[in-house]
Image (spheres, rainbow, N blue to C red):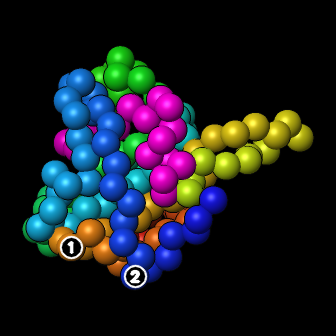
Amino acid sequence: MTKLVEGSKAPAFKSTNEKGESVSLADYKGKKLVLYFYPKDDTSGCTAEACDLRDNYKMFQKKGYEILGVSPDGIPKHQKFIAKYELPFSLLADEDHSVAEAYGVWGEKSMYGKKYLGILRTTFVIDEKGIIQKVIEKVDTKNHSSQIL
């Protein structure tokens, strides 16, 4: 698995959002993008992270950023998560984890001594030219916006 670093070209991706629309990195050409990977809709850490980004969304927009969340959850779960927390940004249904794998954030995790594969919570800040400006691996879910900005 290739480890992406600041200055790397962001890998192209194509996936489906909560509305069933096709979304790709090319759709964000000329825009700054916060691409955040999280394990699961409606869990405590993922909800805290999404709500922190939601609460600071206007600030991100003022600075020219779009936000896009990615998890292996399907479209129906994303729709419920967005509705429940009034999230103003799209979530990609990366059920085959192809986007996560392209970004090197699909890997081995451990919980209660059990090992399994899943999303390694990571955020990539990508500039208008598709270059990674920042990689955040130690995400503070409650204060993620301040880590990014």
Q: Residue 52 appears at what percent x and percent y?
A: 36, 53
Q: Residue 51 appears at what percent x and percent y?
A: 35, 46
- Determine which residue is flagged by label 1: 129
Write the residue at 21% across / 73% down. 129
Q: Residue furthest right?
A: 113
What's drawn in magenta, residue-wise?
88-103
Q: Is residue 148 above or below residue 80?
A: below
Image side of residue 101 versus residue 90, left or right: right
Q: Residue furthest bottom?
A: 7
The local secondary structure at tag 2 comes to loop
Write the residue at 50% across / 76% down. 5
Write the residue at 89% across / 40% down. 113
- Determine which residue is flagged by label 2: 7
Quarter of the image for the N terminus: give it: bottom right
Q: Residue 10 appears at what percent x and percent y?
A: 36, 65
Q: Residue 112 appears at what percent x and percent y?
A: 85, 38
Residue 110, image quadrant: top right
Q: Is residue 29 above or below residue 93?
A: below
Q: Is residue 99 magenta?
A: yes
Amino acid type of disc 1?
A: Lys
